[in-house]
Amino acid sequence: MKVILDFFTRHGYVIELILSCAVFVTALKRRRRFVWRVVGMVVALFALSFFWGFIRSRVNTDNAFLDYVSIMEYLIYFAVSFAAVYFCFDTDVFIALFFGIAAYSLQHGAYKISEVFRILLTARAGDVISGAVYVVMLVCIYVGAYFLFRKSFSQIEKEYLVGKQVVFLSVPLILYTMIFQYSPNDITTALYLVYAFYDILCCVFTLYIQMSMIKSGRREHEYRLSEHLHYIEKVQYEISKKTIEMVDIKMHDVKHQLRALKNILSPEQISDLERSASLYDMTVKTGNEVLDVIFIEKSLLCEQKNIRFERIVDGGLLGFMNIIDVYSLFENAIDNAIEAVSNVEDTEKRVISLMVRESRSMVFIHLENCFTGKLDFERGLPKTTKSNKLYHGFGTKSMRAIIEKYGGNFTMRADGDMFNLNILIPIPKNGAEKNMAAD
C-alpha cells in the first residue's frame, strides 16, 4: 500500500493531467490504432515524470535553479499534453491546442481548489483525512467539469476558432505558471491562500474564455452560413423565375404546334402529347409572384416523386415581406416536407398540405405532412438527421430568423406520424403596400 501511495504522490500531476484531458476529448474522432497511441503518450508522460523527479532529487531545494527547472517542467508537460491530443485524435492543430489549454487549466484549477481544502483541514483533521478530502474534491471537480463542458466541447469545429486567439490563450497559462513557481517557499498559510485564490481565478477565467469562444464562434459561423444561404436562395429564385418564364414561352409554342399536328397524328398520339405537355403547363396564380414560382417548381418535383401537393393559399397577404424572405421561408418549409414524405411508403399518406390565410390581422401559415422514423426536437427545432451537422439544420434556423424578423412566431411539432408547422406573422398597417424589392 505504501508503494502505491508513494507512486501517486510522486506522479499525481501526470495522473491528474491525463484525467483532465479525458474530461474534454471524449467526443473527438479517434485516429487509427488509438489504443496504442494512448498507451504511447501515457508512457511518455510517466517517463517525463520520472525524469523530472530525478532532476529534482539532484538539485538542492534552496537552489534558485530549481525554480527554472519547475517552470520548464510544467511548460513541457503542457506541450506534451497538447501533442497527445493531436497524436491520438483526428483533429486540427489549433483544436488540439485548444483542448490542451482546457486540460491544463482544469488540472491546475482542480489541484489548487483541492489543495486549499487539504491545507485548511490538515491542522484539524490530520493528514489522512485531509488527503482523502483532496482525492474526493478532485473526483467531484472532474465529474462536474465533464457534465459542464461536455456539450460545448463536443460541438467545437475548426471554423469556430481563430488561430491567433487560441495561441493568445496560452499566455495566461505561462504567466501564472511562472508567477506561482517564483512565489516564496516560506510564505504564511494566509498568503499562500491568496496566491492560490488568484491562481484558481486564472484557471476559471481561461475556461470561461474558451466557453465564450465556442459560443461566439458558433454564432458567427452560423451567421456567415445563413448569409451565404440567403445569397444562394436569391440567385436560385432568379434562376427559377427565368426558367419558368422560358418554359411558359415554349409551352405556348408547343400548343400551337400540337394544333397543327392534329391532322397528321392520331387522336391517341395527340392525347399522349398533350398529357405529357400538361405536366409543364402548371399555371399558378396565388397573388404572389414568388409563391407562384415556388409552387410550379415544387409541383413538378412532387409529380416526379408521386407526392400530392395540396394548397389553399392567399399569396397577396405576403406582399409586405421581402421577396427573398418569402422564397427562403417557403422553399425551406416545402423542401423539408418533400424530403420527409419521400420516405413514406404508403402512397395514401404521401401528401403535403399547405394553407396561407388571414387570421385576426395576422398571416396564418399551416403546413403538414407525414413522416417516418423518430423526430427529436432541440429548442423548438427538429434536429437534423444528416451526418454533417455543421452544415445542415440551417434551413429551419433560417426560417426562424425570417419569422422573428417580421415579429412573428411559430411552432413545429410531431403528432404521431404527422409533422405540423404553424406560423403567425402580424400584418403591418400598411400591409397592402407591397415590398417586393430584394435585399
Image (tube, rainbow, N blue to C red):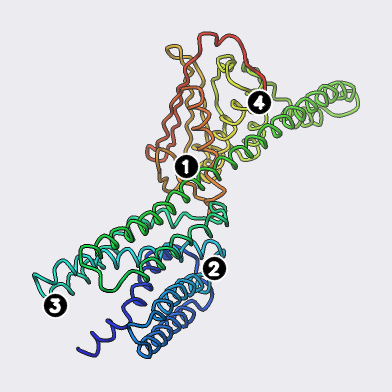
For discs 1 and 2, the disc positioned in front in the rendered view = 2
Residue position marked by numbered label 4 in the rendering: 439
Residue 249's image quarter? top right
**Three-letter code for the amino acid on which mark 3 is drawn:** Val
Residue 78's image quarter? bottom left
Tag 3 and tag 1, C-beta contact below 8 Å: no
Left or right placement of residue 210 versus residue 197 in this view: right
The Cα–Cα distance between marks 4 and 1, rounded to whole angstroms, is 34 Å
Residue 304, how many percent across, how many down?
66, 39
Dot 2: element:
loop
For discs 4 and 1, the disc positioned in front in the rendered view = 4
Dot 4: element:
loop
Residue position marked by numbered label 2 in the rendering: 90
Q: Residues within 10 Å of mark 1 (few under 14, many from 20)?
A: many
Q: Residues within 10 Å of mark 2 (few under 14, many from 20)?
A: some
* Number of marks in the rendered image: 4
- Quarter of the rendering occupied by the N terminus: bottom left
